[in-house]
Amino acid sequence: MSDEDEQEVKKEPKKRKQDKAKSEKLPERQNVVRSLRSEIVYPYLRECRHVDSYERLNHIEEGSYGIVFRAKDKETGDIVALKKLKLELANGGFPVTSLREIHALMNIKHPNIVNVREIVVGNHMDQVFIVMDFIEHDLKGLMQDMRAPFLQSEIKTLMIQLLSAVALMHDNWIIHRDLKTSNLLLNNRGEIKVADFGLARKYGSPMGHMTQLVVTLWYRAPELLLGAKEYTTAIDMWSVGCIFAELLNNEPLLPGRSELDQLDKIFKLLGRPSEEIWPGYSELPHAKNISPAYQPYSTLRSKFTNLTQAGLDLLSKLLTYDPAKRITAEQALKHPYFSESPAPKDPALFPTWPSKGSGHR
C-alpha cells in the first residue's frame, strides 16, 4: 500500500464521524429553517402583547380552527372577541389554516370584514390569539331565534354588504372558501362582518390545483362536489347564492346529509346539468356516477314564489352550474334587484336583538 493510500484509510473514520454529526444536526437545522421561514413570511407575531393584557369574560363558541372568548382590554376597557387559534395540530410549526387566517385578516380591511386589532401570545408556542372587534350576533344563530324573517329591504342591505366584502376579497386574490351564515357576523348597527378566514386562500393566475375539501357541505358548489381539481372565485359566489336563498326563506336552501345527497338536492332544485349549459361537465371525475333520471328544468321559482323577477334572476345567476358563467360579486352589485322597490334599508334603522355572546359580566 502506498503512503498516499495509507493516508486515505486513516482519513476515512474521521470522515464518517463528520458525516454522522452532520446528519444528526439536520433535523435541528430543518426546525430552525422552518421557524425562520414562519418568522419571515408571518412577521405578525413579533413584539406582540401578552394575552394577559385581556380579561376573559365568557366563552362564545368553538369552531374547527379556534375557540372564541368575549374579553376586555385591561388598558382601554374595550370589549373584544379573543380567538385562540388551534395550533396543537401543527406539524413542526403553525398549521396552515391559522397562518392563512392571520395573513388574510391582517392584509385586508373593509367595513364588512371583521376587524383584527392585534395578535397576542401566551407563554407557550401554541398560545396565539387573534383580537377582533366584538360583534353581537352570527347570522345563523340570529335567524334561528328571529320570530319573523328579514324584510326584503333588509335582505338587500345585507346582500350589498356581503357582496361588497366578497368583491374586495376577490380583487385582492383571496378566495374565502367557507362562506356561510354562521361565518357572517351582524352587529346592532345593521352591519355584516365576514369572519373565519381559516380556509381562505391567496390564489394566482392561472389557478393551480387546490384541495376540494373546502366549503361547508350545504354551501358547496357543484364543481367541488363533482371532483373538480381546479376552481375559481366562483365557488364563493355559489355560497353567496345559498346565503341569499337562506335569507329569503329563513332556512338553509340545500341541507344535504352527504355529498351524494347534496348533489341530489341541487339537481332536484336546478335540474340535471348537461354539456349544453355547462361545457366540460361530463369530464368531471364524479359526473359519470350521476343518474340521467333527473328532470332537466329548474324549479327555483316554485321555491321562491314571493321573490320578484329581478330577485329570481339574481339568485339564478348566483346558482349557475357553469362556474365560468356564474355572476361575479362586482356584477351582482350592479344587478337591477338592488335598485327596484323596496329600496335597501339604512343599516342604522335595523332592529336590534339581545346578544347571546354577551354573557353576564
Image (spheres, rainbow, N blue to C red):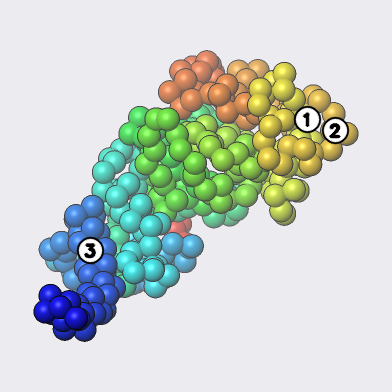
Specify whether 19 is left or right of 178. left
Q: Residue at x 71, y 53 (%)?
A: 258
Q: Residue at x 39, y 30 (%)?
A: 205
* CA gap, disc 2 and disc 3: 54 Å
Count of numbered marks:
3
Specify whether 128 is left or right of 250. left
Please name the amino acid that badge 2 sits on: Pro
* CA gap, disc 1 and disc 2: 8 Å
Residue that badge 3 annotates: 33
Please name the amino acid that badge 1 sits on: Arg
Q: Residues within 10 Å of mark 3 (few under 14, many from 20)?
A: few
Contact between labelled residues 2 and 1, with CB atoms less than 8 Å apart: yes
SS of the residue under disc 3: helix
- Most extreme residue toward the right is 293
Nearer the observer, 242 or 359: 242
Q: Earlier in the sequence, mark 2 or mark 3?
A: 3
Nearer the observer, 308 or 172: 172
Residue that badge 2 annotates: 292
